[in-house]
Image: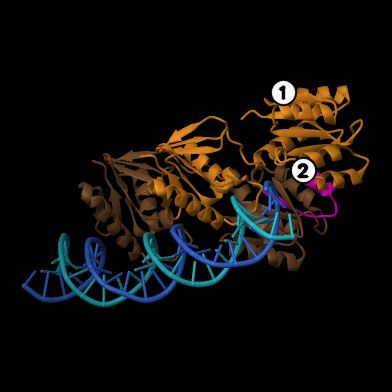
Chain colours: A brown, B orange, C blue, D cyan
DNA sequence: CGATGGTATGACAGAATTGTGACAGTAGTA
DNA sequence: TACTACTGTCACAATTCTGTCATACCATCG
């Protein structure tokens, strides 16, 4: 859920302000101070969103935006342009150069975050909202519901994701660290044993429906969801 | 998804060009050649968007925009202003008068359509006038009235729209930010927690009719309207 | 059999999320 | 103008969820 946001801004004060707001909202900010610097970061890892000041030393933000749109890899990364309020023409140029949205300085942190959220949401690839059926269970991410032959099972967020992962990857054994990567995210630091506890909670929730054999322990390797 | 666009433009050639582009994109164009004529159309049926030339015979486009913003019914209809490229000041005036966006002549069809789509996307979706029935409730947008098996429930505007959205999209979980987009419109910047408060107000209004289970909290995800 | 390494379980404190009441600002109205 | 209705925001309370630990349990192997 957390997104990497590349902030291209040469003025340190504004850079800091942007970074602060972004991290405050749970996103990760990557700082760049000019176009070249931005490309370095981009080549290293593609960000999910680029926040771009129109005023940059050397080549302008508009030019960077054009280059981003011209490059195959970066073509689809959404861009939000930062423009000064006075020069209305910037807005036009910003939009024509392929920016997805723009925001005028001075901006309120709230507006900034609202725009970031809106753009990310618009671009976000539809989560696999399709209903999954396996092992007598029916799990619907869109409705956030699990149906065990007529009865609704209630799960916490983590157990829900865990079960969703298992149902979409049945019959295969996953180690604890693989499960942490897939279900928790590959950047979190939690004990591997934590997986055991959540497996238990999941089993407990499934037990009333005599579905306890679904999640099997593979000693020394990890766990497996088996539909048979 | 098709929208009605009122095109207020006195020059026949440009009028025709605009209409052509608009219909080409699947929208419906309604033609008006001056302010009075525009009001006639507006009184007949509210358009989804108004494309307004700054240069109009008699009263200017800016004045019309002001009148549109002053009127309760037309206040929330988005306006795109058409201005000549030369006069930068018009742009400012156009925006200050309440236009949502502006576009300079000569314009490219692509830019025109991009702006129209952007503005339409941002507006709060307006509800259809059809009566909706779900979960023991009957909601009639036209009469702004809710019927709970015989009794009439009174709701504020926001709660009304919220309930209407839920009733037309039952069983599915919506995040706070999705609800803000759908019910408030994605151009407004309000805290996500505001949704919670309105959910509470809605629940409170529904409670006397023992309809409290209708709106469910899905921890970590959002809310759901469930008819079952 | 006992030792050993891996797994299950129950408890728990702190973190995270949501519910709730109050409040001030705004807009509309008489 | 005063009055009413409505909104968005906040602070705090209530609730749920999470990660971690200590301990009990179990399979395997010497």
Q: Nearer the viewer, residue A199 or A178?
A: A199
User: Going by the image, does A151 lie left or right of B51?
Assistant: left
Whole-percent x, y for residue B42 in the image: 74, 30
Q: Nearer the viewer, mark 1 or mark 2?
A: 2
Whole-percent x, y for residue B103 in the image: 82, 38
Can residue A21 be seen in the rendering of this structure?
A: yes
Whole-percent x, y for residue A10 in the image: 76, 63
Q: CA distance from mark 1 to mark 2?
A: 29 Å
Which residue is at a point 83% across and 37% down the rendered structure image?
B64
**Label 1 element class:** helix
Verify CB contact (< 8 Å) between mark 1 and mark 2. no
Can residue A169 be seen in the rendering of this structure?
A: no
**Magenta-drawn stretch contains A86:** yes
Subunit ID for the residue under disc 2: B
Residue tagged by mark 2?
Answer: B70
Quadrant in the picture for the C terminus of chain B? top left
Which residue is at a point 42% across and 44% down the rendered structure image?
A141
Which residue is at a point 54% across and 57% down the rendered structure image?
B193
**Magenta-drawn stretch contains B144:** no
**Label 2 element class:** helix
* Circle 2 crowding by C-alpha within 10 Å: few under 14, some 14–19, many from 20: few
* Sooner in the amino-acid sequence: mark 1 or mark 2: 1
- The residues colored magenta run A79-95
Residue tagged by mark 1?
Answer: B23
Quadrant in the picture for the N terminus of chain B? top right
């Amino acid at each position: 859920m957390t997104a990497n946001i590349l902030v291209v801004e040469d003025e340190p004060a504004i850079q800091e302000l942007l970074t602060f707001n972004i991290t405050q909202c749970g996103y990760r900010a990557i700082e760049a101070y000019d176009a070249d610097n931005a490309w370095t970061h981009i080549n290293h890892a593609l960000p999910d969103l680029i926040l771009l000041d129109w005023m940059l030393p050397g080549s302008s933000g508009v030019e960077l935006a054009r280059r981003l749109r011209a490059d195959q890899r970066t073509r689809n990364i959404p861009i939000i342009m930062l423009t000064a309020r006075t020069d209305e023409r910037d807005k036009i140029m910003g939009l024509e150069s392929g920016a997805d949205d723009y925001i005028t300085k001075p901006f309120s942190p709230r507006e900034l975050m609202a725009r970031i959220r809106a753009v990310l949401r618009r671009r976000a690839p539809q989560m696999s909202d399709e209903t999954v059926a396996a092992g007598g269970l029916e799990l619907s991410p869109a409705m956030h519901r699990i149906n065990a032959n007529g009865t609704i099972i209630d799960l916490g967020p983590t157990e829900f994701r865990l079960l969703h992962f298992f149902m979409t990857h049945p019959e295969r054994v996953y180690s604890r660290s693989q499960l942490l990567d897939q279900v928790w995210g590959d950047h979190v630091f939690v004990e591997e044993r934590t997986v055991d506890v959540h497996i238990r909670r999941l089993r407990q929730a499934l037990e009333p429906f005599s579905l306890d054999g679904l999640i099997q322990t593979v000693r020394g390797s990890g766990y497996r969801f088996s539909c048979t």
